[in-house]
Image: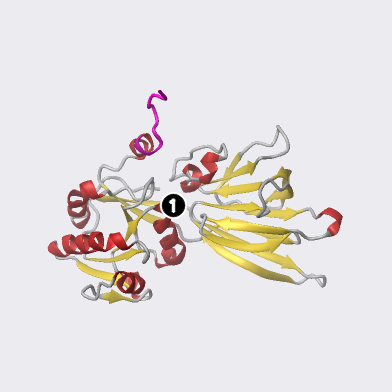
Amino acid sequence: MATENVQQKKIKSVVIISKVYKRPLSSAIKEIAQKFSSYGVKVYIDANTQVGFNLPDLECISRRDMRDVDLIIVVGGDGSVLGVARTLVDLKVPVLGVNRGHLGLLTDVSPSNLDENIKKIVNGEYTLEERTMIDVIVSRRSEDGVGEMVGHSLATNETVIHSGTIAHMMVLKVSIGDKYMYTIRGDGIIINTPTGSTAYSLSAGGSIIEPHLDLLSLVPMFPHSLNCSPIIIPGKSEIKIEFECPDDLPELIAINCDGQVTMRADTKCTVMIRQHQIPLTLMHPHGYDYYSLLRKKLGWGKSLV
């Protein structure tokens, strides 16, 4: 849920994070650091960013100490924000995305309005918005009935469960809580948050969901049935995915989170998806408009010819 456009606390300290292989961003990082410093804000940089961009003049801060800063600034694209969210969400520090990527639905501060927005943020003219994240847990039950965790990851956008092979059908049994919902025969399934409704799910025919809503969405991937539709469920739901094995022989599967983390398992495993206990908090300067962002980034209302 987003806060109203009311005066928030002023920003006194920030940490800047960026991907180390985006070399052209070093000048952008220096510019952002200088602008915040000019307003009396204490500026830090994380160790990977400092080394990767060769920025020894900016003071480094440890991940543990980041919990004491007022704001995490991510310079890059939406993928950079997704990576930071998975690793730092439990610090409970708001995240601001400065767009140096392409689409930019999470990084709504652009270079063209950087000066104006930094001034607003420092003076407390911003809103905070909580975004749901999900825990994805992969486990396998041994012959003696003991469960073993095979993998675990967080996701901000979605988790995609598929065979790992192009156009290879798999059979998934989907349960919500302790209730069986349906069995899907197809290429896999996407379980996404409202934030992820404008990502891979959108390409697969899922609905766009207001990001502040407490919901999750399930979108079958190329189902071998005409009556297997996407469905939206309460955000607190626990989703269990089991698999049918032909001739009881396990087949390999892949569980991908945000297009960045892939866990390998097989059809003898079970995948559990549930809401992460701590949401991601995004910061938006005053004037942020989700619908305006969709019109701009997704081309709503534009002529097709």
**Can you say whether 106 is above or below 302 in the image?**
below
Relative to residue 56, is residue 79 drawn left or right?
A: right
| Magenta segment | 296-305
Amino acid at pointer 1: Arg
Residue at 24%, 50% (x, y): give it. 111
SS at circle 1: strand
Magenta-colored stretch includes residue 10: no
Find residue 109 and report its horizontal and vertical position in percent. Answer: 28, 49
Magenta-colored stretch includes residue 299: yes
Relative to residue 45, is residue 244 drawn left or right?
A: right
Q: Main secondary structure of the magenta part?
A: loop
Residue 173 vs residue 132, the one in the foreground: 173
**Quarter assignment of residue 79:** bottom left
**Can you say whether 72 is above or below 196 in the image?**
below
Residue at 54%, 61% (x, y): give it. 261
Residue at 60%, 47% (x, y): give it. 190
Residue tagged by mark 1? 131
Residue 75 vs residue 122, the one in the foreground: 75
Q: How is the image coloured?
A: secondary structure
Find residue 6 and report its horizontal and vertical position in percent. Answer: 25, 48
